């Protein structure tokens, strides 16, 4: 049976918008169609004055799994460059947003999905979260800004190790090197706690 569900679902909660990756059967890939949907939905949210926080999260045990490798294998030089530019553009828009952006990482966060999380202001993780940039093992390298953002966040040496080895980090190691600020369950509740505290400060300073 065909999966007709949208790749991303938007949820609104009193000034907080949640963008939830919604293809768990496919491990929530950041395919071309998903990036296009993300670009549209995020652009619609950032212009809303009532939205103060935008949270990204996944479904089941997956935050997102990065680019769809089968889709990538079908790209030629031109379309591959366009795909890279699309990801860079979407993630830079996230990085530039006036709202606070939070990656609530509920499970596997791989490759391009880690690049997306790095574009957010804050990253928090569930106890079961797993992080990796596996490009070195696949003979490819991310083109969505991760090579620039990861060293700024965790330092050059840690970033070089993760890029060079493609090894996986659990949530506690991710916290120990500064990749995430909190490890809690339920992770969306953690993101909401931060969001509510921020919104309280916004109201107090008006």
Image (cartoon, helix red, strand yellow):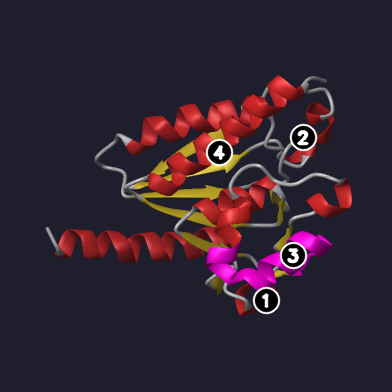
Residue drawn at x 71%, y 43% is 66
Mark 2 or mark 1, earlier in chain: 2
The percent coordinates of residue 41 (x first, y second) are 46, 31
- Can you tell which mark lies on residue 68? 2
Q: How many angstroms separate mark 4 from mark 2 (CA)?
A: 16 Å
Q: How far apart in space, not on screen, are marks 2 and 1 (Cα)?
A: 27 Å
Residue at image mark 3: 162
Of discs 3 and 1, which sits in the foreground?
3
The reply to whether the C-beta atoms of the residues labelled 3 and 1 are less than 8 Å apart is no
Return the disc, 3 or 1, that comes first in the chain's sequence.
3
Determine the secondary structure under disc 2: loop
Q: Is mark 4 on a helix, strand or loop?
A: helix
Q: What stretch is highlighted in magenta?
A: 151-169
Q: How many residues crowd around disc 1 within 10 Å: few (fewer than 14), some, or many (20 or more)?
A: some
Let me know if residue 39 appears in the view. yes
Q: Does the magenta stretch include residue 161?
A: yes
Q: What element carries label 1?
A: helix
Label 2 environment density (alpha carbons within 10 Å; few <14, some 14–19, many ≥20): some
Farthest residue to the left: give it: 206
Which is more foreground, mark 2 or mark 3?
A: 3
Q: Rounded to the nearest whole Å, what is the CA distance between mark 4 and mark 1?
A: 28 Å
Q: Distance between the residues labelled 4 and 3?
A: 20 Å
Nearer mark to the viewer, of 2 and 1: 2
Mark seen at residue 172: 1
Q: Do the residues labelled 4 and 3 touch (CB within 8 Å)?
A: no
Which of these two is toward me, 137 or 37? 137
Main secondary structure along the magenta-highlighted residues: helix
The spot of residue 131 in percent (x, y) is 72, 61
Q: Where is residue 148 in the image (x, y as percent from the top left)?
A: 57, 55
Query: Along the line of sight, which residue is nearer the eye, 104 or 163?
Result: 163
Total residue callouts? 4
Separation (CA) of disc 3 from disc 1? 15 Å
């Amino acid at each position: 049976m065909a999966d007709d569900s949208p790749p991303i679902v938007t949820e609104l909660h009193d000034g907080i918008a949640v963008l939830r990756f919604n293809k768990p059967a496919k491990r929530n890939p950041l395919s071309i169609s998903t990036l296009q949907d993300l670009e549209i939905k995020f652009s619609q949210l950032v212009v809303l004055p009532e939205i103060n926080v935008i949270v990204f999260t996944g479904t089941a045990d997956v935050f997102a799994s990065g680019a769809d490798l089968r889709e990538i294998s079908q790209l030629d030089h031109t379309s591959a460059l366009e795909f890279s530019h699309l990801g860079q553009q979407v993630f830079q828009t996230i990085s530039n947003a006036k709202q606070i952006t939070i990656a609530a990482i509920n499970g596997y966060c791989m490759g391009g999905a880690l690049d997306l999380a790095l574009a957010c202001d804050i990253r928090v993780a569930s106890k079961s979260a797993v992080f990796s940039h596996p490009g070195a093992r696949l003979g490819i390298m991310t083109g969505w800004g991760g090579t620039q953002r990861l060293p700024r966040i965790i330092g050059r040496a840690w970033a070089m190790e993760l890029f060079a080895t493609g090894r996986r980090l659990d949530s506690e190691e991710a916290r120990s090197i500064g990749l995430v600020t909190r490890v809690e369950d339920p992770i969306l509740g953690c993101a909401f706690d931060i969001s509510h505290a921020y919104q309280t400060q916004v109201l107090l300073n008006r």
